[in-house]
Amino acid sequence: MIIYQPINGYCYNSDTYFLYNFILSNLEKFKNPKGELLDVGSGSGILGLLLAKEFNEVSLNQVEIQKEFCFFSSKNAQINKIKSFLYEGNFFELDFDKKFDYIVSNPPFYHHNSIKSENENLKIARYNTNFSLDSFLKKASTILKPQGRLFFCYDVKQINDIMALLKANKFNLEALQFVHPFSHKCANLILVYAKKSSNSLTSILPPVVMFENGDYTQAVFDLFAKASTHSIKCEI
């Protein structure tokens, strides 16, 4: 899969691959998942496009606020011959014309007190100043169908907020997975699967370890190979 990205701006990273694999792990028990999927903050479009390629009965929808990334989301869908409907604008202000079976997102999760980049493109993509977790979950709950599923990744240090806000917005926590930079280091990323109208017990998946002996672990290499993407930097 060819993915065009901006030369100077936010580019997808390994978080997206981990989230993609986490979603596959949780949906593999369902035969031929189908329905409407919304990728919130689609950026270059990579997450939604990978999932649409994997599940050909899922209809891809994307929402993106930055005009530059609207261009890349559309271009990458076209280049990879994947049909997608793009909502251009603020996720919190848009009136969606349908309900969704799945919402996926790699949202900006760096805390608003963190030191911010001077690049406005990076600020919007990385920091939660204008994209709070509470607002995201509230909106997601209103546009998901009953039994709708939500997948996202977040800063693991904010796990207390994640669990409290999921419950407050009537989501049941279905599964978690932690991502560690090294086997002896604390996790720095959490992958979350939540569902509306569910009382299932929570599953904790085996952790993902990124590095070993100065290189990616074999599991991570296998994941990159499975996604099979090639990035090209370009200007609009």
Image: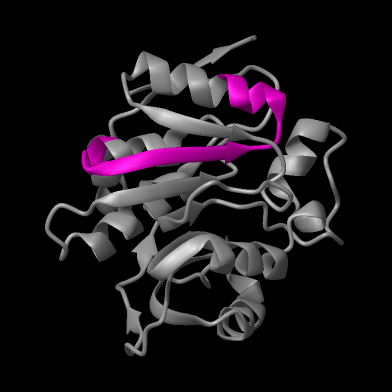
Give the x, y percent position of residue 159.
Answer: 60, 78
Judged left or right of residue 144, residue 116 is right
Q: Which residue does the image show at 48% across and 50% down from the upper left?
A: 98
Q: Residue furthest left?
A: 31
Which of the pair 182/138 is nearer the observer?
Answer: 138
Residue 141 drawn above or below residue 130 = below
Q: Residue furthest top?
A: 235
Residue 234 drawn above or below residue 190 = above
Query: Based on the displayed image, in which of its 4 quarters is residue 141 positioned?
Result: bottom right
Give the x, y percent position of residue 101.
Answer: 38, 58
Q: Which residue does the image show at 75% across and 51% down from the upper left?
A: 127
Q: In this picture, which residue range is highlighted in magenta?
A: 53-71
- Residue 117 seen by the camera: yes
Q: Name the image quarter holding the C terminus.
A: top right
Query: Based on the displayed image, in which of its 4 quarters is residue 207 positioned?
Result: bottom left
Which of the pair 210/190 is nearer the observer?
Answer: 190
Give the x, y percent position of residue 172.
Answer: 45, 82
Q: How many marks?
A: 0
Judged left or right of residue 135, residue 186 is left
Residue 217 drawn above or below residue 4 = below
Q: Which residue does the image show at 51% across and 69% down from the upper left?
A: 187
> Residue 44 colored magenta?
no
Judged left or right of residue 119, residue 76 is left
- Residue 211 seen by the camera: no
